[in-house]
Image (cartoon, grey):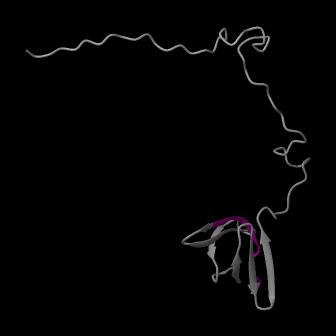
């Protein structure tokens, strides 16, 4: 039986134990595994914060988070060459530079105090 091929997509380490989140490359199925568990013909030997070690007989492999085969940037529209940064909106064409600290249009004012009536039973 040929062992399954996995991608490590996450690791959870807590006082209760260590869990690896694996994606089977053939089916995209997500598998949770703990140390000592067999998954897809492999035994999970070690779970560390960014990698795990799988073993089958004398063969072992180390899977690291984000080790999946990455698409080139030209093929992946979600990976632009340079990040796009927009300036913050100020509400004025000059960027608010001509207004002093007490003259900004975004200054919030406290609502006026409303007197409350108190009644007493006599």
- Which image quadrant: the C terminus? top left
Question: Vertically, is 81 above or below 12?
Answer: above
Residue 21 pos. (x, y %): 66, 67
Q: Quadrant of residue 107?
A: top right
Residue 93 pos. (x, y %): 78, 11
Q: Quadrant of residue 69?
A: bottom right
Residue at 87% in and 42% down:
80
Bounds of the magenta segment: 2-12
- Which image quadrant: the N terminus? bottom right
Q: Quadrant of residue 95?
A: top right
15 or 40: nearer the eye?
15
Q: Is residue 31 magenta?
A: no
Residue at 80% in and 83% down:
60
72 or 104: nearer the eye?
104
Question: Vertically, is 53 above or below 82?
Answer: below
Q: Is residue 7 toward the left or the right of residue 17 in the image?
A: right
């Amino acid at each position: 039986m040929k062992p399954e091929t996995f991608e490590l997509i996450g690791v959870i380490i807590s006082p209760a134990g260590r869990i690896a989140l694996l994606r089977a490359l053939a089916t995209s199925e997500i598998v949770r595994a703990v140390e000592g568990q067999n998954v897809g013909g492999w035994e999970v030997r070690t779970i560390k914060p960014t990698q795990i070690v799988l073993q089958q007989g004398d063969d072992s492999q180390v899977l690291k988070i984000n080790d999946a085969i990455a698409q080139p940037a030209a093929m992946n529209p979600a990976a632009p060459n340079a990040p796009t940064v927009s300036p913050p909106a100020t509400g004025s064409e000059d960027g608010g530079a001509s207004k002093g600290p007490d003259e900004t249009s975004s200054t919030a004012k406290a609502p006026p105090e409303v007197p409350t009536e108190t009644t007493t039973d006599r």
